[in-house]
Image (cartoon, rainbow, N blue to C red):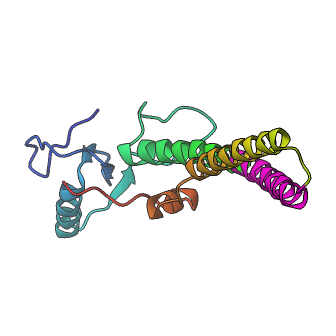
Amino acid sequence: MPDCKGVDGTPCPEVVRHRYIWAWGDEGFCCDGHRGALETRAGQLNRGLQFAPLYTAPTLSGPHPLGELPPSILELESLKSDVRKREKKSTELEREREISTEKTRGLELRVTELTKQLNDSSLMPELERETQIEKIRGLELRVLELTKQSQEVSPPPPTPRDREVIEGAEPAKKKK
């Protein structure tokens, strides 16, 4: 990675962000802070100075010219990938929840039906009635289990940061 030499040629610890070239052909690299100083110097000398950013958006045509991408682009790609994975998992969990809900409805109908049969059949022998009660209790337990499972698989709502990434917005800059 090239170094920023500032206006007077002393090394600068800041991250190099720009490449510049003077009208007479001298060129170099500078950080954001020294860009302004160089532009001022060009104005004082009444000479042309052109700047080009070192980092551009990645293209499909090949690797980045400097071999690495700035952290903000890498972070954005990582977040987009994470959002896609979460969306896929959310879709899977939603399908599981729908299946569990359908099973729960079916079991609830069966419980209602068996309860009605139990109440309507006063002539039912005592042993058969106890068997039906056990079936109803088992079905009720199963309904409770499926209800609990469907509540556990519901995906969390997307956060505002997830929405920013989905819409392609740059994530907020971190404070140093």
Residue nearest the observer in this picture, 126 or 150: 126
Question: As displayed, is residue 91 above or below residue 2?
Answer: below
> Where residue 105 appears, x then y in whole percent?
79, 56
Q: Residue at x 29, y 32 (%)?
A: 1
> Where residue 54 appears, x then y in whole percent?
38, 45
Q: Is residue 169 left or right of residue 9?
A: right
Q: Residue at x 77, y 55 (%)?
A: 108
Is residue 110 magenta-colored?
Answer: yes
Residue 9, picture quadrant: top left
Q: Residue at x 62, y 43 (%)?
A: 89
By secondary structure, the bulk of the magenta-drawn segment is best described as helix
Is residue 147 magenta-colored?
Answer: no
Q: Is residue 159 left or right of residue 89?
A: left
Placement of the C terminus among the 4 image quadrants: bottom left
Residue 3, picture quadrant: top left
Give the extent of the magenta segment.
96-122
Question: As displayed, is residue 52 above or below residue 78?
Answer: below
> Where residue 161 appears, x then y in whole percent?
45, 60
